[in-house]
Amino acid sequence: MNFDFSDDQKFLKSEARRFLEDQCPPARVRKVLDDPAKAYDAELWQAVGAQGCLELCVIAEELGRACAPIPFGSTVYFLAEALMLAGSEAQKTRLLPKIAAGEVIGALATSERPGPLTEASVRARVEGGKLTGDKIPVTDGDIADVAVVLAREGTGIGLFLVDLKGPGVKADTLSSLDPTRSVARVVFSGAHAEPLGAAGQGMELLQQVLDRAAVLIAFEQVGGSDKCLEMARDYALQRYAFGRPIGGYQAIKHKLADMYVKNELARSNAYYGAWALNTEAAELPLAAATARVAACAAYWYAVKENIQTHGGMGFTWDVDCHLYYRRSRQLAVVAGAPAVWKERLVGELERKNAA
């Protein structure tokens, strides 16, 4: 079975890389990072939307490589995937064209307290079509137009679409490790909530959305991991110590080799996830968990070793290592922490072996 991208997808990948290298250099990411009043790059967001990119795994990898400061993940991985999975025809017709055009920003609002998300931890409630409760942290919640919200209704838990620009919604921006992907505390006080999917199926639908998002995020993480490896390699070839490039020393060679191995393992698992997602295979939950765990591990290892390869320079503001360090931490928790996905991976393997 061939999990590799087709020639058309490879061409799209090269074009996406060329576009992002031109439009999203590190200096542009820094402008968002350095400006507290700027939560994302609005111009870049519009430009990406204008590209009309449909091969999401390919695009996600290049966005991760560029460390793009735009709400692509919140909008496409979560809002669009939720609509495609459970939205009515009216909801899809209303929102999907605007998402494709970059006219709508989305968000996923699920957690309300520290720790794993469970049915017992959901306190937000919908009564008579009105939503009350708090959600924290909500990635891009301070700039989003529409949120997919997990809340109780009656005796069950459901997913709901909420207009974040409408009445009964207040979003407060929070400090975070990666200001290029803003987070907020969103307070709902009688906001209109539109059901998304079947009543009482919120937890099941959410897990399906997270499985899909995990694959796409894994590609974004692989893109960032590859960029870290390239940065470390390039620096190791140009930095001299004791009369020779540091890349000639065995300790540095081992760092780069270990980064490469972990990156390739994460890539192969991401490709498996992409196949399962594209074919709607029954293996998607297992493939998503595998891709998520491997990609989180590879990106975290790559950013640390990239900094170590750069030595003292790696910790300074003059080097871009920290941009990827911050993004690796953000992506590691945005769809659930690695520990949660490890538990899911073990559970899926046990179910598969018991079948």
Image (tube, helix red, strand yellow):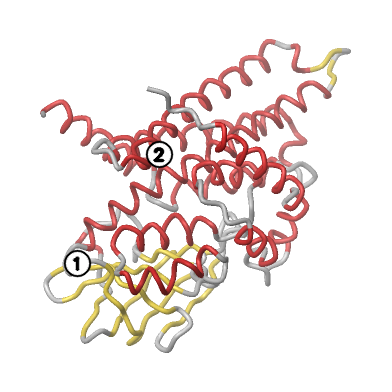
Depth check: give the residue in front, 238 or 83.
83
Q: Residue furthest right?
A: 243
29 up-or-down from 7: above or below: below
Mark 1 residue type: Ala
Determine the residue positioned at 23% across, 68% down. 158
Q: In which quadrant will I find the C terminus?
A: top left
Mark 2 residue type: Arg
Identify residue for label 2.
292
Determine the residue positioned at 67% across, 42% down. 15
Q: In the displayed structure, does residue 262 sit left or right of residue 129?
A: right
Q: In the displayed structure, does residue 78 sit left or right of residue 341?
A: right
Disc on res. 177: none
Query: Where, by quadrant of the figure, is residue 282 drawn?
Result: top left
Q: Residue furthest front?
A: 8
Determine the residue positioned at 53% across, 72% down. 142
Q: Position of residue 307 (x, y in %)?
A: 67, 34
Depth check: give the residue in front, 84 or 203.
84
Q: Position of residue 163 (x, y in %)?
A: 42, 79
249 up-or-down from 321: above or below: above
The nearer-to-camera label among 1 and 2 is 1
232 up-or-down from 123: above or below: above
